[in-house]
Amino acid sequence: NAGVTQTPKFQVLKTGQSMTLQCAQDMNHNSMYWYRQDPGMGLRLIYYSASEGTTDKGEVPNGYNVSRLNKREFSLRLESAAPSQTSVYFCASNTRARVGSYGYTFGSGTRLTVV
Amino acid sequence: TQLLEQSPQFLSIQEGENLTVYCNSSSVFSSLQWYRQEPGEGPVLLVTVVTGGEVKKLKRLTFQFGDARKDSSLHITAAQPGDTGLYLCAGGAYGQNFVFGPGTRLSVLP
């Protein structure tokens, strides 16, 4: 089973460049999320989509945009990359039928370096 | 904003030893989850606890949710090198997204 698939796995950008991180899930989950993980800071929520057609800001949304393309796909876009956006990015999905009952399934991450 | 703290931040032990890691908050959660993350991979869900005082066992791992639903612990018996990884706790409250702690990085030496 594929679960959550993220592309690319690695990326180096120059300051000011743009890019889109792709995420797809095949588990028929309603909700999808984008997190960034930095040393000592845990996972911080950037944006989420509780259901197809909706998106909302998380804890650290500045400098990012998202698109919920359909139920399976949720992309994250950096319009003008900055060195502070160097991080590991994870996409996750779950079903929010009952908050607190269902765990997240994570992708394997995208390691982004902005120079 | 709900915050989760985890302790210790780092732990290095010998194979066969027992250990306990902790997850604490000043907030009440409706449920709490534990994940393990290996290098280069995303976190993988180990367990969800939803009832205050609940204890769940997964082979050599024992998870406990505090009576007040503000804290949790993970106990590993006879640790093995395969237990090495970053252990993350995540707390969820009704109507809100889960909040993740910074993690405990465990190294089990053969």
Image: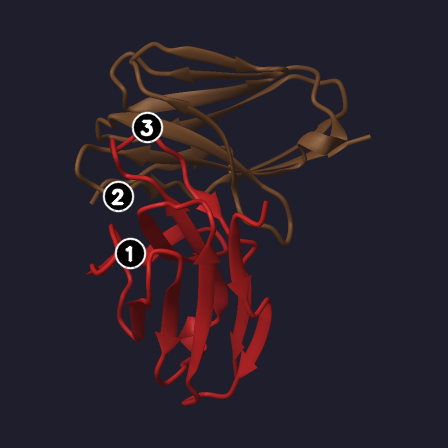
Chain colours: A red, B brown
Residue position for label 3: A101
User: Looking at the image, is mark 1 or mark 2 nearer the viewer?
Assistant: 1
Label 1 close to label 2 by CB (< 8 Å):
yes
Between A29 and B16, the residue placed more toward the observer is A29
Task: Please tell me which residue is depicted at 34% across the width and 9% down the height of the picture.
Answer: B53
The tag on residue B87 is: none
Q: Is residue A82 visible?
A: yes
Question: x%, y% of residue A76?
Answer: 38, 69
Answer few, some or many: residues within 10 Å of disc 3's Cα (few below 14, many 20 plus, some between 14 and 19): some
Between A67 and B68, the residue placed more toward the observer is A67
> What is the distance, in whole Å, between disc 1 and disc 3 at their CAs?
18 Å
> What is the distance, in whole Å, between disc 1 and disc 2 at their CAs?
9 Å
Answer few, some or many: residues within 10 Å of disc 2's Cα (few below 14, many 20 plus, some between 14 and 19): some
Subunit under mark 2: B
Q: Going from the N terminus, do you reach mark 1 or mark 3 first? A: 1
Tally the marks.
3
Residue position for label 2: B97
Residue position for label 1: A48
Q: Amino acid at mark 3?
A: Ser
Task: Please tell me which residue is depicted at 45% across the width and 45% down the height of the picture.
Answer: A27
